[in-house]
Image: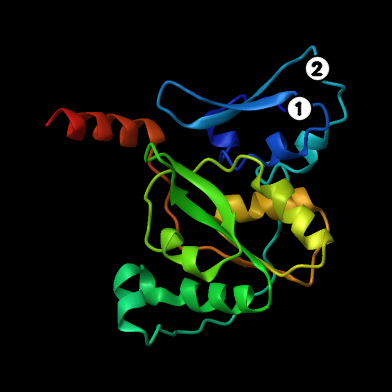
Amino acid sequence: MIKIEKKDDCCGCSACYNICPQNAITMEGDEKGFAYPVVKQELCINCDLCKKVCPILNQNKIENVPYAYACINKNDKVRKESSSGGVFSILAEEILKNNGVVFGATFDSNYNVIHTYIDNKNELNKFRGSKYVQSTIGSCYSDVKKFLNQGKYVLFTGTPCQIEGLKKYLVKEYEKLYTQDFICHGVPSPLVWKKYLEFRQKK
């Protein structure tokens, strides 16, 4: 079973949570609010799938330098609602146009940042803009796999750690999977965000 000896050994991607066939793993916040896996030993069957999909334990060696492109969304309204030029919306619209599914981070009714998916262009605006806090992945990786197995196009946007966790979870490459990450120097704690919301509510 997966065991976190040092906090640096986990990026909170939730790949282990999604892969566990026994639902023996939960993602629980530590004293600072960051999510880490907790294993219910009585349910664990020692299949070690959690270790096999961990992007920290199984880091890929980068052997090529990818090309870099620069672009910007020509739609002024979309660009103003977006971060980094509104490129996400361009990619997402193309996926949705082809009857695909788009995954991204949004706020729930309590202003928690969660990952979810849409299949309708009218909902695209909720994924626009940076959230600046660690999102809860939930069952998104297994949802991605389900849609890919149905032959659908999928665009998954998230932190580099989340995307690496997704790819490890999927094991194989899928022709219809597209991923989009961003330059990331680490994510703030959801606990800090929660305390900020509580502070604002008291004002």
Tell me the quarter of the picture where residue 76 sits. bottom left
Q: Position of residue 8 (x, y in %)?
A: 54, 35
Q: Residue furthest bottom?
A: 74
Identify the secondary structure beneath mark 2.
Answer: loop
Residue at 76% over, 14% down: 41
What sort of colour scheme is used for the picture? rainbow
Residue tagged 2: 43
Identify the secondary structure beneath mark 1.
Answer: loop
- Label 1 crowd (10 A; few <14 / some 14-19 / many >=20): some
Q: Nearer the viewer, residue 18 or 99?
A: 99
Q: Earlier in the sequence, mark 1 or mark 2?
A: 1
Q: Amino acid at mark 2?
A: Leu
Q: Position of residue 142 (x, y in %)?
A: 73, 47
Residue tagged 1: 23
Q: Nearer the viewer, residue 107 or 130?
A: 107
Report if residue 50 is visible in the image: yes
| 136 lies left or right of 54 | left
Q: Residue furthest top?
A: 42
Q: CA distance from mark 1 to mark 2?
A: 8 Å
Tell me the quarter of the picture where residue 187 sits. top left
Answer above or below: position of 186 versus 122: above
Q: Position of residue 14 (x, y in %)?
A: 63, 39
Q: Nearer the viewer, residue 181 or 151?
A: 151
Q: Position of residue 77 (x, y in %)?
A: 31, 78
| 39 lies left or right of 118 | right
Say whether marks 1 and 2 touch (CB < 8 Å): yes
